[in-house]
Image (cartoon, helix red, strand yellow):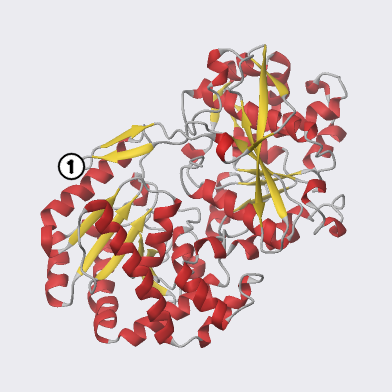
Amino acid sequence: MPTYSGGLGVLAGDTLRAAADLGLPMVGVTLLHRRGYFRQHLDARGNQSEAAATWEPAQLLELQTPCVTVTLEGRPVRVCAWRYLVHGVSGRVVPVYFLDTALAENLPWDQTLTDYLYGGDPRYRLCQEVILGMGGVAMLRALGHTDLQTYHMNEGHSAFLTLGLLTEQSGGAEVRAIGAAAREAVRQRCVFTTHTPVPAGHDQFPADLVRRVLGAEMSAALAAECCLNGTLNMTYLALYFARYVNGVAMRHGEISRDMFPNYPINSITNGVHATTWAAPPFQRLYDRHIPEWRRDNLYLRYAISIPVGEVQQAHTECRRELLDEVERRQGVRLDRAALTIGFARRATPYKRPDLLFTNLERLRRIVEQVGPIQVLYAGKAHPRDEGGKTMIRHIFEAAATLGERLRVVYLSEYDMALAKLLCAGVDLWLNTPRKPQEASGTSGMKAALNGVPSLSILDGWWIEGHCEGVTGWAIGDDGPRDDAVEEATSLYDKLEYVILPMFFRRPLAYAAVMRGVIALNASFFNAQRMLGQYVRNAYLSSSNVPEAEIGQHPERG
């Protein structure tokens, strides 16, 4: 189901999988995105073109009976829902509801509102967010989820659910006339996670557009607290109505407190779903040595006692599968003995995927004097992100310049299936964001589950996960200053003097680092630990959420 563009969508899925594993009473709500994000095509020069990622919901989801109505621009828009059940290792299930407006009774334009992820203009996006938030609350009621205790807004896109709750609290009165006690009652039911340290990443809509879409009464209810300089900021809406707010890494929490100084913002560092992202060879390895790991990911700590030879063997299987897939896709047979570096994430300028190519002459010299390197890239640029598309072209240009001396392959159509192969099959995971713009990052966590160490800028989660020479290596220092030349020099120094000599001359020492990243990083940066923190610190932080509710059937969540 191509209903995600990158880390945030995958993280939401990992969270729900962990909830099912732990038997937590949780329900997920999202939009259907009938035409997905997009299919990526790259030509010989790295120019990206896009096509719709169509799929058939009826083949994977179950259509639910009730429909609800939301009001957009003064007209009714009907919304139905499709259900998917996430099954956990506990035997419990968590339902996810996909909202859909492709109904014959809707106007043609309204039928498209749940077609595209990140599609259309501000009007399209605003209407989508009304459907997700207000329509999501109405749909939960129609489906019988009447006793929900806590609503978790995952980024500001869903913040209009607070208006849905206010409407319920109003009892038919005008929403803008609701008193402080009723607003506080809504606040006590909501928690909010912010995912971006970049101001441009927070959805904002002109007040006149909000008035046109929501109507005078609803827009007036938002004006006092959530509109600044004639603009509705969805993050401020979520902050105002949340009893608990968190960033997604310790450093991101600090940055968020600077961005929004009037709100108490905590930190819960992201994690990934272990049994989803551990490749089959590593799953088998863990099953042999740590049979409890699926039920309790913390047991991965005991990977420190697995013989390094068995870690090497599992990785060899993963690398073979990855390189075979590269050959199948690209017709390129890569060196089975070279150090294979992986870089795969959304293609956008702040991620700096081309930092590795700052000094091509030095890169060539490292390969000639120390040992062979090959690099695998993947990632989609947003269709309107010209900077991201330029990054992809830069990589193609560097690949052409380096030629056979250092093979660089950019794999198109990055998705979860390809991510699983890359995170498990490369020898080193590279991450080079511009500080402090990496809120968390999760790709390195997925690599860690497969014993792949990171070489990364000290930003996001890596500040917490980095232990030099034990879980991987840092590029530069942890200071706030961002100097691309210094960081590129640090990157080359680590490759030339530390990583490559260890990989080629002391393979058992390198395997010990692989084992260390499993024991120290995979055991902590997983969705079970993350969700446990949400339960303790966010979901149970209000007296109206009884702890006894945890573990009850999700239909009563």
Q: Is residue 342 left or right of residue 403?
A: right
Q: Residue lying at the far front in this picture: please name it.
A: 59
Q: Is residue 390 left or right of residue 535?
A: left
Asked if residue 225 shows in the view, the reply is no
Using the image, determine if residue 495 lies above or below residue 199: below
Asked if residue 504 shows in the view, the reply is yes
Q: Secondary structure at mark 1?
A: loop
Residue drawn at the location 23% of the way across and 38% of the way down: 47
Neighbor class of circle 1 (other Cα within 10 Å; few <14, some 14-19, many 20+) is few
Relative depth, front residue between 267 and 388:
388
Q: Is residue 93 left or right of residue 339?
A: right
- Residue bearing the label numbered 1: 45
Q: Is residue 308 left or right of residue 253?
A: left
Residue 230 lies, in percent from the top left, at 57, 22
Residue drawn at the location 53% of the way across and 46% of the way down: 9
Residue drawn at the location 36% of the way across and 54% of the way down: 344
Residue 449 lies, in percent from the top left, at 49, 69
Residue 105 lies, in percent from the top left, at 64, 14
Callout count: 1
Residue drawn at the location 84% of the way across and 59% of the way down: 547
